[in-house]
Image (spheres, rainbow, N blue to C red):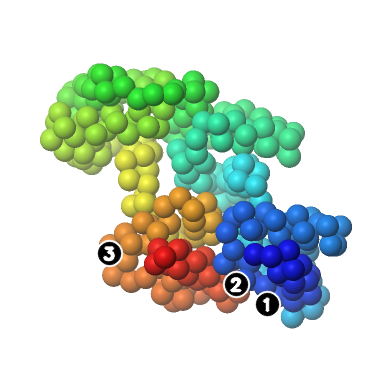
Amino acid sequence: MSPQNYEALCAEIHETTHFVVDLASRTQLECRKIREKYKEMYGEDLVQGLENRTRSQRNESRISGETCAGLCMLVLIPHERDAITAKDALDQQSGVNYKALLEVFVGRKSSHILLIQQAYQKKFKRQLDHDIISIEPSHPYQRILMALAASHKSHHAEVSQHIAKCDAQRLYQTGEGRLGALDEAVVLEILSKRSIAQFNLTFSSYKKIYGHDYTKSLKSENHGGFEDAFKEVVSHICNPPKYYAKALYASTQGTSMDRGALARVMVTRAEIDMDHILVIFEKKYGMKLKDAITETTLPEDYKEFLIALANKTDTTCCK
């Protein structure tokens, strides 16, 4: 994209609402450069400019709050975006959005988590870990998130087959290998000391040793809150595309209280595994994601934004 095209798109953003699909179709790097050019041209941060458009008195220049939030995700630096996602998840009136927090702590590298924590403290003058510890009332996800935060601080470099085998045996002994509920303390201890990659290897070892996925052991008993929360973590670690496809489907069907999941997942996974997510979505639910979005009752400009994101991934897959 040439500098002239950046200028033209910035002018369109400043004056009209016709830019939504065009901006959504850009790569994340292009979106960052557009933000820089917008600041240079108008002396205003593009994020602030977009937020102002939700309050515009002119219908022809107003965008919905959902579209604004999605576009801001596109133009923000990833760790800034995730810091804001975490704060929004903690501040939701309907209750803490633990799944959004889980996406951050499971789906990001340890080096990125450190940048998120720094961005969170800089923007909100608070510590992310402390805000999670302070959640009231207490929740199983809270303890899992703190264990994951501790894990990221360990900076594991390599994975070990021996450790994976030992951890798999411990998980069996503390779970389906004994009577009663899963031993939460043992699970949290392991979770706090292992990287996501190491945990993934542990679940592979579990399947080799015991002949089935670890999640089946969590399904076979009448479990409570901790087991249900841990099952979400395991599903995310073992098969992220499948996990996200399920989250997207729930959002399009209105069965999820997580209103921001569509944009959040499609933006954050766009240049990671969104192509795989789209394939799984269509195979599992018998329809393309963009068709499912079309059938929702979401604001029209938001649907256009989401469909542009889906089309961008479809185009990338076909190259």
Q: Amino acid under label 2?
A: Val
Mark 1, Cα crowd under 10 Å, few <14 / some 14-19 / many 20+, is some
Q: Quarter of the image holding residue 46?
A: bottom right
Residue pictured at 56% horizontal, 51% vertical: 94
Looking at the rendered image, the quarter that the N terminus falls into is bottom right
**With respect to residue 107, does 180 lie above or below?**
above
Query: Does 142 sit left or right of 198 as displayed?
Result: right
Residue pictured at 68% horizontal, 77% vertical: 18
Mark 2, Cα crowd under 10 Å, few <14 / some 14-19 / many 20+, is some
Dot in front, 2 or 3: 2
Mark 1 highlights which residue?
18
Mark 2 highlights which residue?
21
Position of residue 160 measured from the top left corner of the image (x, y, whole percent):
31, 22
Residue pictured at 50% horizontal, 39% vertical: 108
In contact (CB < 8 Å): disc 2 and disc 3? no
Q: Secondary structure at mark 3?
A: helix
Tell me, for residue 283, which label it has, or none.
3
Q: Amino acid under label 1?
A: His
**Residue that extends furthest to the front in the rendered view of this protein:** 2
Q: CA distance from mark 1 to mark 3?
A: 33 Å
**With respect to residue 107, does 319 lie above or below?**
below
Asked if residue 208 can be seen in this view, the reply is: yes
Q: Which residue is more in the foreground, 60 or 309?
A: 309
